[in-house]
Every structure is written in structure tokens, then in C-alpha cells.
Amino acid sequence: MAKVVTMGEIMLRLSTPGYQKFIQADSFDVCYGGGEANVAVSLANYGHESSFVTKVPKNEIGDCAVAALNKMGVDTKNIAHGGDRLGIYFLETGAAMRASKVVYDRAHSAIAEADVADFDFDKIFEGADWFHFTGITPAVSDKAAEVTEAALKAAKAKGITVSVDLNFRKKLWSSEKAQKIMTNLMQYVDVCIGNEEDAEKVLGFKPGNTDVTSGDLELAGYEDIFKQMVAKFNFKYVVSSLRESYSASDNGWSACIYNGETGEFYHSRKYRVTPIVDRVGGGDSFAAGVICGFVDNKDFKSALEYGVAASALKHTIPGDFNLVTRSEVDALVGGDGSGRVQR
């Protein structure tokens, strides 16, 4: 099994019970999650050596976040402790035509205030095969962006494959700042993952006339911008999830990939995911599935299919973490999406 390192922010998630709106809720359901942490959990669940790097406060809430990762088999020995608080996000889960809503309370969190000196990246990357980060971490703060670049430099110095999920968050930074920071970080990236909004807001590439709200995907537009991205950044692979959002409860879900070395473009099988139980973490479960496919030495088309299937299943699971097993993903890839009771 491979050793994969991810780095980012883990947060306390407070979600309204069921499908209640914030104004209705007298209590919140508690769990922990965050882009790179969700990827780490998936990879640990698939049997890989998965290590998560972050900084959490040295208090009981920070301990709970680490315990949530330990429970899932994630290596947490390289997590730094200090700072004042753990970031929080509030989730109101949508249904039908009512969209889900997220409210952040993460300013001045421990990872946002972390310094490069908090981490021994030479030790962290010892024996690692793959490093994954997202565009969320450098968006959290300028200091977090500095830590991210230091990690990338250390990973590339050791010859480690690097992937990014662009993950644009308009509540954290502007498109202008995202492009300034992330364009610089792309020099360290081998595998670029995102969606149509990420490509446009983070790197300035727009895929043709695609309209995800109507389910109108112009695949030729994706292939064209993938070629441009490879030409500019020399990526080995460019990957995009394709979410056709018919409603908050009903999505089409597929993905496409471009091989920068051979020029091959491939579109995966499409799943109709309805009803959606929880779409938060869907993109993270997709990225983790693709990474798992690559470190399992699958070909790029099979790696993509694995990521799409894993993520389709994640939409049926409450919480940030994707808790499906390898056998469940393999069954869906093999065509068994019947949902029949397993006795």
C-alpha cells in the first residue's frame, strides 16, 4: 500500500438535524471534517497509509478532531498543537429546489495562524508516495499559503507526486487573489483536480457553454481547456468532476480526465444520484478515489471510474467522511447499483 500525505484544516461541523433550516434548529449534529482530512479518511479506509497534517488547538475540541481521524485509521502524529481555536462551519442541508447553505466561523483558527516552523516537512514526507492539498488551505490566510508552498517545495524535492483539488471558496477569497496565489503553486502540481467553477475562478479557464444547472455539459469545452492547462502548467493529468444539479436532492454525477502525456480525453460513466443524503465531501471523496486508483497502479481511465463510483456512494452517507469500503466501490464500478439488501 502507498503512503499518502494530505495537509489542510479540519473543522468542527455543526449541522441542523434532518433538513431543518437554521431558524428551526434547537440543536446541531456534531462531526468533524474538511477537504484534505476527508481525503485522508477515504484513503485510510481503502487500506493505504494515510497521514494528515494540520494544526489544532491544544484543548479538548482539538483533541476531539484528532480522535475523529484516529478512529478512521489516519496517522495524526505530524499534527501540530497550539493556537486559540478550531475552525467551525455550520451546515443547513437543502432539499429539492432549496439549496444547502454553509456559514463559516473559522477566522484566526490554529491552522490559519500556523508558521512553517510548526512542521518538519523533511520528516513528514519521509517514505511518502503522494501529497495532496486543496485550494482551501492557502485561502484560509496568507500564513497558511506560505505553509502550503513550503510543503510543496519539500514534497517535490523528494520526488513525490503532488495533486491539488482547486476547490474555490468565494467566502474565503476573491477570484483575483486565488489566481495570483494558486497560479504560482501550480508549478509543483502533477495532477490537477477541480470542476468548471474551480477552473474558471482559480486558474482563469472557462469550459465553453457548459451550464450545470440545466444539465448541459459541453465536453469539447472541457477537453479544450484541459489542453490549455497542460500547455501552461505541464500537468500530467487534468481531472474534472461533472455535477449536473437538477435540484439539491437530484444530481447527475460523472467526470472527465485528460492525459497530458498521450493527449487522450475520457468521460466516465454517469450516475443519477437521487435522493442525495449529504453532498458535502462529495468532491473530496472523488479526489480520494482518483488518487487511490493511481496509487493502486490502475490506468487513468480506471482511476477516474473508481473516483466517480466512490463519490456517488458518498452522497448517500451523512457527514463529511466517505465510509464506504473497497468492496462496495468495486461492486458499483462493476455495475451493481441496485441497492438491494445484502443478507
Image (cartoon, rainbow, N blue to C red):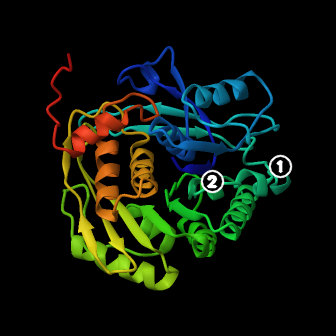
Residue type highlighted by circle 1? Asp
Q: Is residue 214 visible?
A: yes
Bin the neighbour count of mark 1 within 10 Å (Cα to Cα): few under 14, some 14-19, many 20 and up: some
Q: Is residue 262 left or right of residue 280?
A: left
Please determine whether, in this image, residue 262 is positioned above or below residue 154.
Answer: below
Please determine whether, in this image, residue 185 is positioned above or below residue 214.
Answer: below
Query: Which residue is the site of mark 1?
Result: 118
The percent coordinates of residue 109 (x first, y second) are 72, 41
Mark 1 touches mark 2? (CB < 8 Å) = no
Direction bottom: furthest residue: 231
Residue type highlighted by circle 2? Thr
Q: Quadrant of the C terminus?
A: top left
Q: Is residue 250 visible?
A: no
The percent coordinates of residue 134 (x first, y second) are 55, 56
Rendered residue at 36%/78% (across/down) = 225
Q: Is residue 148 left or right of residue 164?
A: right
The quadrant holding residue 260 is bottom left
Q: Secondary structure at mark 2?
A: helix
The percent coordinates of residue 264 (x first, y second) are 28, 76
**Which label's residue is closer to the chain start, 1 or 2?**
1
The quadrant holding residue 129 is bottom right
Rendered residue at 32%/50% (across/down) = 306
Q: Nearer the viewer, residue 206 or 164?
A: 164
Q: Nearer the viewer, residue 262 or 100?
A: 262
Rendered residue at 19%/56% (across/down) = 214
Q: Secondary structure at mark 1?
A: helix
The percent coordinates of residue 9 (x first, y second) are 64, 44
Q: Nearer the viewer, mark 1 or mark 2?
A: 1
Q: Is residue 92 left or right of residue 256?
A: right
Give the alpha-carbon distance from disc 1 to disc 2, as whole Å.
16 Å
Query: Which residue is the site of mark 2?
Result: 137
